[in-house]
Image (tube, rainbow, N blue to C red):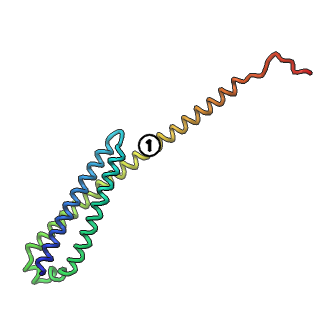
């Protein structure tokens, strides 16, 4: 029974590693989208939605892993369990290292993407602000020119 639990733990970590690889690929695709002059925000949003689904799957795997580990954790940490399941423990350790490395890589990619998105939004806001200012200046110029077109009669006698 314990061997099945350990196999489940290994499979869970393998699935987690595969999902993290998908997330990393998705983040790299989003980074490529952000490098373009005109960002396709619809494609970016689709990528974000896909990442959300993958993160939900990752959270479910984590919960399942913790539940199964609660059943066999003591056995794996005992001296006799370490001897009996040495190969499986090594595999688990390697997978945990792999998952941790991918998690760190994903966090770094996401931090870079976040910084680029914030910069893009600042550029868009600056463009909008510039457009508003230009519009306001043009409207003020228009009003001034309209007021200058009205000239009171110059040769009219104002006496009654």
The residue where tag 1 is placed is: 124
> Residue 37: horizontal and vertical position, in percent?
35, 39
Helix, strand, or loop for circle 1? helix
Question: Which residue sits at x=67%, y=27%?
Answer: 146
Question: Which residue sits at x=24%, y=69%?
Answer: 61
> Would residue 138 appear left or right of 42 to someone viewing this image?
right
Name which quarter of the figure residue 3 lies in.
bottom left
> Would residue 17 appear left or right of 121 to someone viewing this image?
left
Extreme residue in the top direction? 155
Q: For the C terminus, which image quadrant?
A: top right
> Residue 15: horizontal and vertical position, in percent?
19, 64
The answer to whether residue 85 is above or below residue 106 is below
> Residue 102: horizontal and vertical position, in percent?
22, 60
The answer to whether residue 60 is above or below residue 1 is above
Name which quarter of the figure residue 16 lies in.
bottom left
> Residue 69: horizontal and vertical position, in percent?
20, 77
Q: For the N terminus, which image quadrant?
A: bottom left
The answer to whether residue 153 is above or below residue 14 is above
């Amino acid at each position: 029974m314990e061997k099945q639990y350990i196999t489940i733990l290994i499979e869970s970590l393998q699935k987690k590693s595969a999902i993290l690889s998908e997330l990393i690929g998705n983040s790299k695709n989003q980074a490529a989208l952000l490098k373009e002059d005109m960002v396709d925000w619809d494609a970016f949003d689709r990528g974000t939605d896909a990442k959300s689904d993958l993160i939900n799957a990752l959270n479910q795997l984590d919960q399942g892993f913790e539940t199964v580990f609660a059943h066999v954790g003591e056995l794996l940490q005992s001296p006799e369990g370490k001897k009996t399941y040495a190969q499986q423990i090594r595999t688990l350790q390697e997978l945990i290292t792999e998952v941790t490395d991918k998690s760190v890589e994903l966090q770094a990619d996401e931090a870079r993407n976040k910084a680029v998105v914030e910069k893009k939004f600042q550029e868009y806001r600056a463009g909008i602000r510039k457009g508003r200012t230009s519009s306001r200046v043009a409207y003020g110029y228009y009003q001034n020119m309209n007021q200058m077109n009205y000239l009171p009669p110059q040769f009219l006698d104002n006496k009654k």
